[in-house]
Image: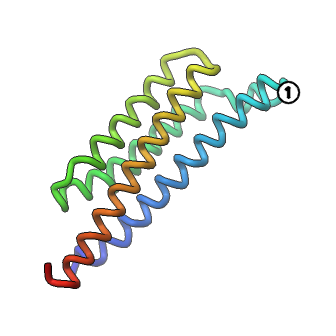
Amino acid sequence: MLQRAISPIRRKLDRAGIFLSGACAVHCLLSIVLVSGLGLGGELFLHPDIHRVGLVVATLIAGVAIGWGAMRHRVAAPFVVAMTGLTFMGGALAVPHGFEEAILTIIGVALVSLGHILNLRHVHSAACKERCGD
């Protein structure tokens, strides 16, 4: 009974993680275009705190949603993929602002998003197996 209540929460967290990963990728691309191409918004878009906060939020959401899924379904792939993505995102904090940072961040958020997608697929397949009795 408790697991049925938990599953929708985890699904929402996975969906939030996918949305935030996409928003982060858009932020990176827009930052490059606006700051490099037009010289606008450097102080706002490239502020290091945005990236630090983003990494903390991504780590919390991925840790809860994907960690929960890994423990429940005993499937490591979503966890490994997402943690690899978080490592890329952390690496992006270690390089100067610019192209390298954006590439590392985009690779990272793509992997974190893929981890959430894989996690959602395992939730769906587990629910299907439960309903169908497999």
Mark 1 surroundings: few (<14), some (14-19) or many (≥20) residues within 10 A: few
Question: Element under label 1?
Answer: loop
Quarter of the rendering containing residue 8:
bottom left
Q: Residue shown at 60%/35% (left/top)?
A: 50
Q: Which residue is mark 1?
A: 38
Q: What's under tag 1, amino acid-wise? A: Leu
Q: Is residue 19 above or below residue 44?
A: below
- Residue at the farthest top position: 96
Left or right, 130 with reference to 94: left
> What residue appears at the point 47 percent right and 53 percent down from the top-left corner?
17
Of residue 66 and residue 53, the one placed in the foreground of this image is 66
Residue 114 placed where, x, y %?
Answer: 41, 49
Q: Residue at x 19, y 61 (%)?
A: 72
Residue 13 point in image, percent of width and height: 42, 60
Examine the rendered structure and indicate whether residue 66 appears above or below residue 85. below
Establish if 53 lies above or below 128.
above
